[in-house]
Image (spheres, rainbow, N blue to C red):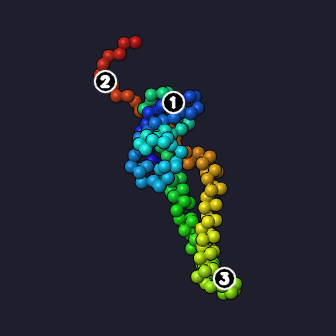
Amino acid sequence: MITENGIVSQADVSTAWVKTIRSGACEGCSSRESCGTSHNAKEMIVMVKNTLGVEKGDQVVIGLESKPMIVLSFFLYVFPILLLITGAVIGDSLAPALGMNKSFCAMILGFSFFGAAFLVIRRKQATLSQKEAFKPFLVRKKSLPDSGQCRVS
């Protein structure tokens, strides 16, 4: 699981907006500029379900499961390449039957399948973004360190 520390910047009964500082996990991600977080390069604001009853100013840990991230990485990076290769192989084998140059037919079908992969990804994006497995969640509320001072009620 990928976790980040943050501070609740706004909260209501069902939703909390958590401000985090972009970490090394974000720096290595190619989608860091388009993941739906805030505009600032260092700070991000992430919307999560308020399952722990947090309030503004609370320190929390948010998490994201690793398995969905691996699935997304495969879908975004490997799937298009597989379709490109599949299209090229099909084009190469169909070229003699179509009376075309093998390389040209392989290139045309390879790029066509590659483009089709991105159309599939675009269509799947909406459904995947609605699934809970692909959304960050509150892991725990961090307790404030005890300052050792007596509190008067």
Q: Secondary structure at mark 2?
A: loop
Q: Which residue is mark 2?
A: 147
The percent position of residue 17, horizontal first and vertical second, equals: 51, 34
Any part of residue 54 in sight:
no
Q: Quadrant of the C terminus?
A: top left
The percent position of residue 89, horizontal first and vertical second, equals: 60, 78
Q: Secondary structure at mark 3?
A: helix
**Identity, as a three-letter code, of the amino acid under mark 3:** Leu
**Identity, as a three-letter code, of the amino acid under mark 2:** Ser
122 above or below 8? Answer: below
Q: Earlier in the sequence, mark 3 or mark 1?
A: 1
**Identity, as a three-letter code, of the amino acid under mark 1:** Gln
Q: Residue furthest right?
A: 98
Q: Which residue is mark 1?
A: 10
Q: Residue at the spot x=61%, y=58% of the render?
A: 121
120 above or below 133? Answer: below
The percent position of residue 125, horizontal first and vertical second, equals: 61, 53
